C-alpha cells in the first residue's frame, strides 16, 4: 500500500540512507562537499519539523531495516552513483511504495535515469541549501501521489478489461451450452451475481472454473 495517502497530523517519519561504501569510519574518505551536503540536509530536515527516525548504511540489511522502520519518506544521501542502494529500492518500492528523494553531486544522465526507474521521486544535484529541503520534499510527495494515482487508474483499467474478457467468455459458454441469446445469458449471470452477492467477473470466473473441472 502506498505511503502518504492523507494529510498527516504526526511529523513525517524520515529514514536517511548514506551510500558511503566504507565499513570502517576511520578509513572512509568522505569529501568535504559530501560532509557539507549531509549537514545541510540534516539541518533542513530538522528545521522543517521532520522526524529522522534512522540513518542507515546502504548495505545488505537495508531492505529488512526499511520494512521494520516503515518510514513515510526515504532520503538517499549519495556522493556518487548509488547503484547498490537503487537495486534495494526497487524491491522496497514493490513491497510498499513511498516517496524517495536522492540528494547527490552526481549529474550523470544515465545515473539520473536509473534512479527514476528505481522509483526515486526527486533527484537533487548539488547546490543544496537547508531552506530548500522542505519544498523539495513537498514536491517529491506531490509527484509521488500523482504517480500513484496514475498507477491505480491504470490498474483499474486493466482489471476492468480482464473482468470483461471473463464475462464475455462465460457468457459465450452459456449461450453455446443452453442455446441462449447473448442478452438472456448476460441477464442470467447478472441475476446470479446479485443473488450470490458476487461481482459479475467473479461469477464468470467460477463458471469457467466449474466447466474446466467438469470438462
Image (cartoon, rainbow, N blue to C red):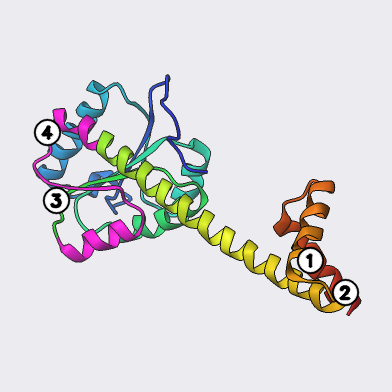
> Residue 112 vs residue 90: left or right?
left
* Comes first in the chain, label 4 or label 1: 4
- Please provide the residue range marked out in magenta: 108-136
**Residue at x 42% of width, y 57% of height:** 90
* Comes first in the chain, label 2 or label 4: 4
* Comes first in the chain, label 2 or label 3: 3
x and y, in percent, of residue 77 in the image: 25, 44
Picture disc at residue 105: 3
* Residue where numbered disc 1 is placed: 185
The crowding category of the residue bearing disc 4, from other C-alpha atoms within 10 Å (few below 14, some 14 to 19, many at least 20), is few
Front disc: 2 or 4: 2
Picture disc at residue 129: 4
Seen from the viewer's position, the closer of residues 206 and 188 is 188
State how far apart marks 4 and 1 are (Cα): 66 Å
> Residue 78 vs residue 127: left or right?
right
**Residue at x 57% of width, y 64% of height:** 161
Mark 1 vs 3: CB contact within 8 A: no
* Comes first in the chain, label 3 or label 4: 3
Element carrying mark 3: loop
The crowding category of the residue bearing disc 3, from other C-alpha atoms within 10 Å (few below 14, some 14 to 19, many at least 20), is some
* Residue where numbered disc 2 is placed: 178
The relative height of residue 25 versus residue 114 in the rendered view (above or below) is above
x and y, in percent, of residue 100 in the image: 34, 45
Amino acid at each position: 500500500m502506498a505511503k502518504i495517502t492523507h494529510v498527516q497530523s504526526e511529523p513525517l517519519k524520515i529514514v536517511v540512507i548514506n551510500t558511503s561504501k566504507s565499513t570502517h569510519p576511520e578509513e572512509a574518505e568522505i569529501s568535504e562537499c559530501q560532509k557539507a551536503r549531509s549537514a545541510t540536509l540534516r539541518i533542513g530536515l530538522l528545521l522543517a519539523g521532520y522526524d529522522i527516525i534512522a540513518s542507515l548504511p546502504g548495505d545488505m540489511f537495508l531492505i529488512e531495516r526499511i520494512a521494520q522502520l516503515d518510514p513515510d519518506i526515504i532520503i538517499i544521501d549519495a556522493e556518487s552513483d548509488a547503484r547498490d542502494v537503487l537495486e534495494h529500492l526497487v524491491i522496497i518500492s514493490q513491497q510498499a511504495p513511498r516517496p524517495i528523494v536522492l540528494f547527490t553531486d552526481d549529474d550523470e544522465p544515465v545515473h539520473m535515469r536509473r534512479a527514476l526507474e528505481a522509483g526515486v521521486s526527486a533527484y537533487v544535484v548539488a547546490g543544496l541549501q537547508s531552506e530548500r529541503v522542505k519544498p523539495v520534499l513537498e514536491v517529491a510527495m506531490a509527484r509521488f501521489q500523482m504517480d500513484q494515482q496514475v498507477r491505480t487508474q491504470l490498474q483499474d483499467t486493466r482489471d476492468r478489461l480482464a473482468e470483461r474478457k471473463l464475462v464475455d467468455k462465460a457468457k459465450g459458454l452459456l449461450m453455446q451450452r443452453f442455446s441462449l441469446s447473448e442478452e438472456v445469458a448476460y441477464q442470467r449471470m447478472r441475476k446470479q451475481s446479485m443473488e450470490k452477492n458476487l461481482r459479475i467477473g467473479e461469477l464468470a470466473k467460477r463458471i469457467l472454473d466449474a466447466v474446466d473441472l467438469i470438462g
